[in-house]
Amino acid sequence: MARRNPRGGYTINMHRLMWTVKAALVVCLLAGILFPGIPGVEGKGWPERCVGYPISLLIVPLVWHLRGRRVSYPHLADALFVTPFVLDLLGNLVNLFDTVEQFDDFLHFVNWTFLVAAFVMFLRPYVLARWNLVMLGSGLGAIAIVAWEGVEWVIQEMGTSGLQLTYDDTVGDLLLSTSGGILGAALAAAALTRRSDSNETASEQA
């Protein structure tokens, strides 16, 4: 009797997850366009989001293509990368940013967990030690949030009044996002090394 390949089932599930997340992004954007009067949508730059956010759908495919498609497509990394944009849109659609005081802080932590986990998943072909993956992922997460806050500061200095940045808010975002990035790096690194160990065990038993 032929032995079933569990890897095939895993790939199919990750493929479905990826397309579910990407479809959710499109649905959220369309909802904001069709119902522009929703409190969480009105005045939140939805047309600009409709231009910028779909780019997230193309980042992972582009990187994979530029790397020569030497490894199987990273469906899970793609899903993880797009998820923060979906969460941001959902938060606006149900007006959580304006009605839940700590929602923005929560989202900073969670979004950086997903983003850094996606980056660490990209490193799978290099077969790095767990501590290397955690350090690289955490470092990228810290650099990314510093860059993000810098861009927000520049935008505010150009005359945009909607951001209302404060010192406390900026420091809080830096700490929360960096912490979320460390968690995401640790979780992704653990998953990768565990899968690598399982593959080695299966090869030895074959």
Image (cartoon, rainbow, N blue to C red):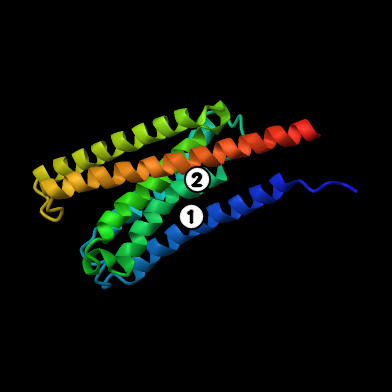
At which x and y percent is residue 42?
23, 67
Helix or strand or loop: what does disc 1 sit on?
Answer: helix
> Local crowd at mark 2 within 10 Å, few (<14), some, or many (≥20)?
many
Mark pair 2, 1: CA separation: 9 Å
Q: Is residue 71 left or right of residue 84?
A: right
Location of residue 33 by image quarter = bottom left
The answer to whether residue 178 is visible is yes
Give the residue at x 34% y 38%: 141
Q: Contact (CB < 8 A) between labels 2 and 1?
A: yes
The answer to whether residue 59 is visible is no
Compare residues 46 and 122 and report the one nearer the observer.
Answer: 122
Give the residue at x 53% y 27%: 128
Location of residue 71 by image quarter = top right
Would you place residue 45 above or below residue 183 in this image?
Answer: below
Compare residues 180 and 126 and report the one nearer the observer.
Answer: 180
Q: Earlier in the sequence, mark 2 or mark 1?
A: 1
Q: Circle 1 is placed at which residue position? A: 22
Would you place residue 23 above or below residue 58 in this image?
Answer: below
Would you place residue 33 above or below residue 146 in this image?
Answer: below
Q: Amino acid at mark 2?
A: Asp
At which x and y percent is residue 47?
29, 58
Q: Circle 2 is placed at which residue position? A: 78
At which x and y percent is residue 147?
25, 36
Location of residue 29 by image quarter = bottom left
Give the residue at x 47% y 36%: 120
> Local crowd at mark 1 within 10 Å, few (<14), some, or many (≥20)?
many
Give the residue at x 41% y 30%: 136
In the rendered image, which quarter contains the C terminus?
top right
Helix or strand or loop: what does disc 2 sit on?
Answer: helix
